[in-house]
């Protein structure tokens, strides 16, 4: 931090002369900065102003949406004795004409306890006994499942893939029981999605708010 405030264009006034700070925090006289670098700086700052504003709008929109749906749930329960959704909290709301829909999906964060090491030992025994040429695809799934990522976490998607495999080996079955016992829900997050269609016979089209998927 320089302690000297910069304007929205990144220019800092020092003793009446304009400067900008470089990536190392050094003051660089404005007239010595290459025009191409200054142009790039201006464009990025302009885009970021719009991005910050849009991010704030989306945050406020999500807050209002969850408040509106929460109030609707309370009103339906109080006035009409109706409860939306199932035990996990997933809910669907729809217009009377069936052309607009809002869904709330609850995704659980799953962690694994020490029983996972028991499962790993049993699966290693299976791999050792199976010949190198047998079940190569299963061997690959096991390897990927227990290869830790840069944060030291196992590959959750591949762990769940193991649970879907139908293998009769008793050690495999015991390993799958150990994996299920190791699962612990450590939190959850609600995702709101929006859909519309022109006619009730049409497929639902998502109203895209994700920038990466926007057309």
Image (cartoon, grey):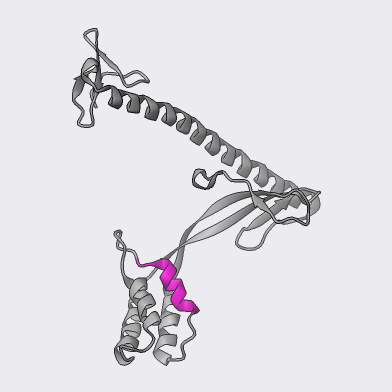
Figure check: 128 above or below 12: below
Using the rendered image of the protein, determine whether residue 180 is visible from the camera's viewpoint.
no
Instruction: Check residue 160 for magenta coloring.
Output: yes
Q: Where is residue 187 in the image (x, y as percent from the top left)?
A: 47, 58
Q: Is residue 68 left or right of residue 173?
A: right
Using the rendered image of the protein, determine whether residue 190 is visible from the camera's viewpoint.
yes
The residue positioned farthest toward the top in the image shown: 16
Seen at 46% across and 32% down, the residue is: 52
Q: Is the magenta stretch mostly helix, strand or loop?
A: helix
Of the pair 72 and 55, the residue shown nearer to us: 55
Q: Position of residue 192 (x, y in %)?
A: 59, 49
- Which quarter of the image is occupied by the C terminus? top right
Of the pair 209 and 68, the residue shown nearer to us: 209
Of the pair 82 and 63, the residue shown nearer to us: 63
Q: Is residue 132 left or right of residue 72?
A: left
Figure check: 114 above or below 129: above
Q: What segment carries the magenta color?
A: 154-164
Seen at 71% across and 46% down, the residue is: 72
Seen at 39% across and 76% down, the residue is: 141
């Amino acid at each position: 931090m320089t302690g000297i405030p910069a304007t929205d264009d990144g220019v800092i006034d020092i003793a009446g002369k304009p400067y900008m700070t470089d990536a190392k925090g050094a003051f660089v006289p404005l007239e010595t900065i290459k025009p191409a670098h200054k142009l790039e700086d201006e464009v990025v700052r302009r885009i970021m102003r719009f991005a910050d504003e849009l991010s704030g709008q989306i945050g406020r929109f999500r807050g209002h949406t969850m408040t509106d749906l929460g109030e609707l749930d309370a009103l339906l329960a109080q006035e009409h004795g109706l409860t939306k959704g199932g035990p996990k909290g997933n809910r669907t709301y729809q217009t009377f004409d069936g052309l607009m829909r809002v869904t709330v999906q609850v995704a659980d964060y799953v962690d694994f306890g020490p029983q996972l090491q028991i499962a790993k030992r049993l699966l290693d025994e299976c791999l050792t006994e199976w010949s190198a040429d047998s079940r190569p695809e299963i061997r690959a799934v096991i390897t990927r499942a227990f290869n830790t990522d840069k944060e030291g976490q196992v590959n959750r998607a591949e762990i769940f893939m193991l649970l879907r495999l139908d293998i009769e080996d008793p050690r495999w079955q015991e390993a799958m029981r150990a994996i299920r016992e190791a699962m612990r829900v450590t939190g959850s997050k609600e995702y709101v999605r929006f859909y519309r269609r022109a006619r009730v016979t049409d497929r639902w089209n998502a109203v895209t708010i994700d920038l990466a998927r926007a057309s």
